[in-house]
Amino acid sequence: MSFTGKYELQYQENFEPFMKAVGLPDEQIQKGKDLKSISEIVQDGKKFNITVTTGTKVIRQEFTIGEECEVETLSGEKIKTVVQMEGNNRLIANLKGVSSVTELNGDTITLTLKAGDITLKRVSKRI
């Protein structure tokens, strides 16, 4: 199953509590809570290029499954991690105390981020 495509955020759950838990300032949380994001994913075998555009902010991530890479966290910090693939439709990573699971089911991508006991769920649909 290929992740390649463009996806638009449909809805999210627990945005504000999660962002507070990971240390984002209230002003940034208020600005970002109602913005729709567009994610563009290009998958070439085990190599991924992901561009997420939210308002005027653009985050680009590039990684190869099973190899160490540098990614940007929600707070803008750059950290090293290894992204693993489970089955052919789940990407899993640990981002400095935050677990990240991205699951593709048909035309829907669900991103689940967990920090302690708080879970952020973001659901996007292929456009």
Image: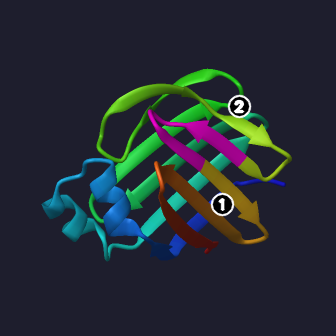
Query: Residue 22: x percent and y percent?
Result: 33, 48
Query: Residue 111: x percent and y percent?
Result: 58, 59
Magenta region: 91-100
Above or below residue 41? Residue 93 is above
Relative to 13, is 29 on the left or the right?
Answer: left
Residue bearing mark 1: 5
The number of callouts visible is 2
Q: Quadrant of the N terminus?
A: bottom right
What type is the residue that disc 2 sits on? Ile
Residue bearing mark 2: 65
**Residue situated in front as seen by the camera: 127 or 91:** 91
Residue depicted at 19% across the width and 59% down the height: 28
**Residue situated in front as seen by the camera: 66 or 121:** 121
Mark found first going from the N terminus, 2 or 1: 1
Residue depicted at 42% across the width and 70% down the height: 14
Question: How many angstroms separate mark 2 from mark 1 (CA)?
Answer: 18 Å
**Residue situated in front as seen by the camera: 49 or 100:** 100
Residue depicted at 45% across the width and 55% down the height: 52
Query: Residue 50: x percent and y percent?
Result: 54, 47
What type is the residue that disc 1 sits on? Gly
